[in-house]
Amino acid sequence: MKILFMRKKISLLIFMFISFWATAQTINVKGIVKDAITGDVLPGVSITIKGTTTGTQTDFDGLYSLSNVEKGATLVFNYLGYAQKEVTVNQQTINVGLDGSAESLDEIVVVGYGTQRKKEVTGAVTVIDAEAIERLNPTRVEQALQGQVAGVNITSASGSPGSSSNIRIRGVSTNGDSSPLILVDGNVIVDLSVLNPNDIKSINVLKDATAGIYGVRAANGVVLITTKSGRKESELKFQLDAWTGIQSTSKKIDLLNARDFALYVNDAGDKTRFFVYPNKGTDWQDEVFDQAMISSVNFSASGGTKKAAYTFGVSRLDQDGIVGVGKSNFTRTTARIGFNYDILDNLKLSTTGLFTNSEKNNLPEGGIGSVLYSAVNVNPDLAIRDENGNFSTVDDISQIEIINPLAQIANNNNTTRIDRYSATIGLDYTFLKNFTASSKFQINHATVLYDSFSPIADYGPGKSANRLQEFTTDFSDIYDDYTWDNYINYTNIFNDDHDLTVLLGTSIFKTTGEQFYGSSQDGTLVQPRVIDFDIARGVGFFDSRLSSIFTRLQYSYKGKYLLSAVLRRDGSTSFGPNNKFGYFPSASVGWNVSDEPFFEDNKVINSLKIRASYGVIGNDKIPGGAFVSLLNGEGVYASNNEVTQEDLLFGVAIGKIGNPDIRWEKQKSANIGFDASFLDRKVKISMDAFSKRTEDLLIAPQVSGLIGPYAPGASTPVKNAGTVENKGFEFKIDYNDSFSEDFKFNMSFNFTTIDNEVLFVSSDSGFEQGGDFGVGLGIFTSRMEAGFPMGYFHGFKTDGLYQTQAEIDALNASSPNGIYHNTAGPGDLKFVDTNGDGEITDADKAYIGDPIADLTMGFNIGFSYKNFDFSANAFASIGNDMVRDYERKDLYANRGTYMLDRWQGTGTSNTVPRAFAGASINTDNFSDFFVEDASFVRLQNIQVGYTIQPSSLAGSGISKLRIYLTGNNLFTITDYTGYDPSASSGSPIGAGVDKGFYPVASSYLLGVNLNF
């Protein structure tokens, strides 16, 4: 019995020992997986225990954990684009750095209707990742492109909250709509304000003929935006990014103070004392500009199951204006959802939804009658309010549009509300092993509501903004469009060497819209001979369609020799029956030189690819139905010059003038370049030389008013008017290195040169013109003319000032007509007789500058040390000119401080003309005196952040907590005297004329990133 008892005790001890020993040999393993070079965390890395099916994936922050892993087991790490790595388990925390695979090289790049490994890409494509976007904290997506992508330049006609930006890829190649095609997850988006920048995973910019797969809408390049999405078999994760800060103006124009202004007026008035020297005046810019708040909250979540992946997010942006604060406020609320589901192993569903609501309070801006135009021009000796406490009226300045800017802000009540809905649904079906059929349907709907209320107001004698009655205006625009893409993709590898992909598809696009407007005021006459209707109503419709068939062949031999060819047929309702369809081919080739046997022993260059492309892309970005003429509008017309009520006629008049012969604008694009990486891929270089030649340029030229341009809905005819070419060179270098586990460094630099030249103009005069100088002078600033840049400034060259009457008399004596320069006097600008005929006439006008930059540059730098991180971004534009046209030519309107150096007698100045009380050759002629070098260097962004140590967050449920400070548009180095040298206006023929641009704001932000 004792023996039996002893045996049981021994058996129990042995069992307990074995259990303890087994438990001691398994541990729980956790860690983080990063890129070995850049230090970026890698989400979605597959981790398995070698020899088993047990495994997991890293989460959004690159973190993973595995339970009950035997000591001595091997973990296998796999990630697309990186070399496989095996690590032996000998401790509980295993952090891993993955190296870029020599075979895969780099990231997956989004291209038309698919993706490619960057090694296989034969076109000029640039990728911006989410991290770069997050560092910039942009309020609009376009701001994330400036300085990041070679060949891309962003301009805006205003820095006010919610204002749109213009994206230009490789110069100006059309006089119409020069904006690129923008797709968000494959859905065409016209206005990027609908998108929250924090939702973006990556931005791919297609810059050459390889964009031709998207057809006519891609004539100006393509911006492909991929939003963040969930991953299958991943737990639900949340992200919160919130920031708030303060804004202020980045620039004030140097204007005369009250005393200097009084001296100037007295000088102009032939020494008559117009003013007693004031002791104190009003700095109208100080009064108009104010500090303004800005804040943003972004919340998102993502996750997935074995068969599904999902994501959703909401955001809110609230931005006051630095002019008028709430009177120029902008708010944006977005909601986004995405869902992918594997219905079957070979049938996949994808859906996205996006809703955006925005509300923008509008102040008059960007020209004559704007708040800043008045602030610059109102005389500084005027008090803000009169003795009764009311806003002062501007009585001295006769120009009818200059008023008290503070009164203008107070009486302004203009609001634009926009609701946008976008949705996509797509199916991908794989069959016969090598075929995939895809169908995607996309819809967009937008409702735009604009309302304006103008109260009774008196701004001074004869002012155009005076209101004897209350006036209300309402607009309502409704836009709908849909795109239906269907395509089949065939992919196969033959004999392990020949990789072939063939795409065949169709695309249908339709957009429709309705526009309603109405206005009302008290039913009395507000001007003589003009009937004032109590209620006016109007309605308009449009319908535009595009139908396309396309095919693409991609071929690779041993991954070394690459070929891609595209053919697309587009049909557009913008053209008449004889020119409705166009065929547009493109092709590109590539050679991965580094895969050749003779390159195997190269220890410095890790990869080298040479590529080239050529193609033709059409452009139909003109108003719909431009090939037909219309009688437009129900209007009221006078039968004679002495109008009485009995003379008024009701009816229609010539409106839009059609041109049945207009045809496709065609862009012929050529590109050659290379991509290389060095020093274990720490250094990457891309270089491209390009030519973009646009033929049959679509232009709506200036026409005589005698044909009835004042009929409601009137417009000038569109015609194919010429040829323009952009040639240039792009260069980009990136450097990323991890000097230690604690210290990582990155830097990038890019530059682009552009030579823009008009080669041909189809007009009797040999040029087209646009832009306007001054007010009511009828002077064009800009021309499109062969041999010059598009929209160059055409005016008088100057050669200093006339110093004496004797100098003028000598020139008159040598002139054939006895008058060299009519009305010229000492202290006036001396125009150059460029044609040498002995007199100054309009024939002497010549090239005096252009708004197109010769060189743009971007510079980015960043580093992290332990938990601290720093980044900075700068942009430079060199060689662009700007017309200074925000000063009203009136004796009592203020002037810039440059007038302190004005001519006041022989030899006192040879650059700034004399003061003058009325019209003069100095103010009423467009000359290079008004053209300034607008080259600039801008520090766009600085950010400093600190990430809380993960161990300090244990048990809180928070996986990441980062606090950061950001400064945007901190300073600009420029010689330009206006508000913003980066702003632009009008179409390419008329760009760069500054009538008082709303300046870009400087901002200082405090924010937090939270993952849980």
Image (cartoon, rainbow, N blue to C red):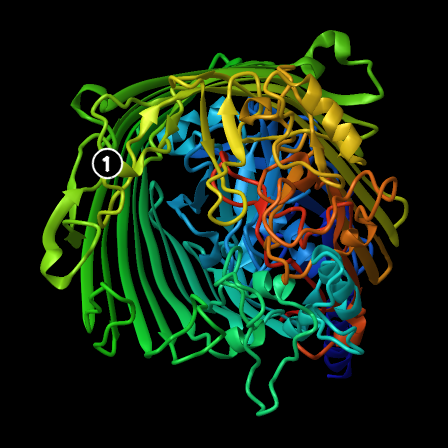
| Residue 44 visible | no
**Towards the viewer: 42 or 798:** 798
State the SS at label 1.
helix
* Residue 39 % position (x, y): 77, 48
Q: Is residue 768 above or below residue 827?
A: above
Q: In which quarter of the view is residue 768 placed?
A: top left
Q: Is residue 290 above or below residue 512?
A: below
Q: Neighbour class for label 1 at 10 Å: few (<14), some, many (≥20)?
A: some
Q: How many marks?
A: 1
Q: Residue at x 71, y 61 (%)?
A: 265
* Residue 1011 % position (x, y): 64, 68
Residue type, mark 1 in image: Ile
Q: Residue at x 74, y 82 (%)?
A: 5
Q: In which quarter of the view is residue 471 placed?
A: bottom left
Residue 333 falls left or right of residue 536: right
Residue 610 falls left or right of residue 514: right
* Residue 506 % position (x, y): 27, 30
* Residue 533 % position (x, y): 19, 69
**Towards the viewer: 447 or 625:** 625
Q: Is residue 216 above or below residue 385?
A: above
Residue 881 falls left or right of residue 124: right
Provide the residue designation for mark 1. Answer: 707
Q: Is residue 855 above or below residue 262?
A: above
Q: Residue at x 61, y 72 (%)?
A: 295
**Towards the viewer: 494 or 699:** 699
Quadrant where the N terminus sits is: bottom right
Quadrant where the C terminus sits is: bottom right
Residue 136 falls left or right of residue 669: right
Q: Residue at x 62, y 37 (%)?
A: 823
| Residue 472 visible | yes
Q: In which quarter of the view is residue 997 placed?
A: bottom right
Residue reaching furthest top? 598
